[in-house]
Image: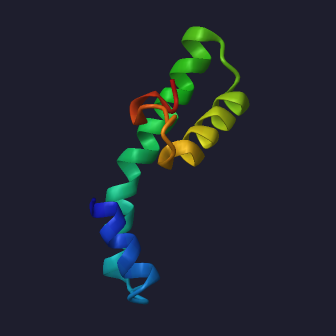
Amino acid sequence: MRLNRERNNVMHGNRVDERALIAVLRVTAPLIGAGFDRIAHAALERGVDPMPLAAQAALGIQLADSRTAPDLCDVLE
């Protein structure tokens, strides 16, 4: 929710000052870190190559609005 609010501030409110960018970084850093953790875990524990995993996640994100969408937590599984 906070990420979407900050995105709207930057995209629609033309807020690109330091406060807005710091807020976006504060919100996105944990999300990016969690994604990297899942990629590293899959590569080290299950031997999954990162590129197919990223392609699978991208497809899951594209399907997010459809009825056959995967659960959000399963996008990088």
Residue sticking out furthest to the left: 2
Residue 73: x %, y % from top left: 40, 31
Give residue 23's quadrant in the image. bottom left
Disc count in the image? 0
Residue sticking out furthest to the bottom: 14
The quadrant of the image that shows the N terminus is bottom left
Residue at image coords 36%, 46%: 30
Residue 70: x %, y % from top left: 48, 32
Name the foreground residue: 58 vs 47: 58
Name the foreground residue: 52 vs 67: 67
Image-based side of 59 in relation to 30, left or right: right
Residue at image coords 55%, 25%: 40
Residue 9: x %, y % from top left: 36, 80
Q: Is residue 7 above or below residue 49?
A: below
Residue at image coords 46%, 27%: 74
Give residue 8's quadrant in the image. bottom left
Q: In this view, does 31 lie above or below 19?
A: above
Image-based side of 19 in relation to 73, left or right: left
